[in-house]
Image: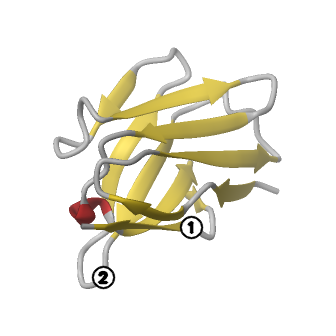
Amino acid sequence: QVRLVESGGGLVQAGGSLRLSCAASGIKVSIGTMGWYRQAPGKQRELVASMSSGGSTNYGATVKGRFTVSRDNAKNTLDLQMNNLKPEDTAVYYCWWAGSWGQGTQVTVSS
């Protein structure tokens, strides 16, 4: 059974940084594509970043150059380093793998 647990969210001022982590069980993060999505109030869920099994990455246009997705095969986690955060980054951030979702972690960026 796949289980994804996100952590690392919180409240940060604009310009600050946060690092999210998605701990996976029941799968190996090195297999298949994993991703981070986010959903702000009243908006659709959108792709933030993804990483394929081969290590190729893909980023949403609004986060490119500020966010970095990485994978730790030993810890079996998918991480998201978020720098230069903006108020519009405020959302619940979800980890995704093959149709499975984590419970989400709240990120709030104050201006």
Residue shown at 29%/35% (left/top)?
A: 66
Image position of 85 (left or right of 106)? left
- Position of residue 7 measured from the top left corner of the image (x, y, whole percent): 66, 57
Q: Secondary structure at mark 2?
A: loop
Q: Which mark is residue 41?
A: 2
- Position of residue 24 measured from the top left corner of the image (x, y, whole percent): 74, 46
Q: Quadrant of residue 3?
A: bottom right
Q: Secondary structure at mark 1?
A: loop
Around disc 1, counting alpha carbons within 10 Å, would you say few (fewer than 14), some (14 to 19), or many (20 or more)?
A: many
Residue shown at 61%/27% (left/top)?
A: 71
Name which residue type carries label 2: Pro
Residues at marks 2 and 1, CA–CA distance in whole angstroms = 14 Å
Q: Which residue, given by chain and number where applicable, does mark 1 sit on?
A: 104
State which quarter of the image contains the N terminus.
bottom right
Residue shown at 56%/61% (left/top)?
A: 9
In terms of depth relative to the viewer, which is nearer, 10 or 28?
10
In terms of depth relative to the viewer, which is nearer, 18 or 100?
18
- Position of residue 97 measured from the top left corner of the image (x, y, whole percent): 58, 48
Around disc 2, counting alpha carbons within 10 Å, would you say few (fewer than 14), some (14 to 19), or many (20 or more)?
A: few
- Position of residue 77 measured from the top left corner of the image (x, y, whole percent): 70, 37
Name which residue type carries label 1: Gly
Q: Which circle's residue, 2 or 1, is located before the other in the chain?
A: 2
Q: Quadrant of residue 29?
A: top right
> Do callouts 2 and 1 mark residues in contact (Cβ within 8 Å)?
no
Residue farthest to the left?
61
Image position of 59 (left or right of 11)? left
State which quarter of the image contains the C terminus.
bottom left
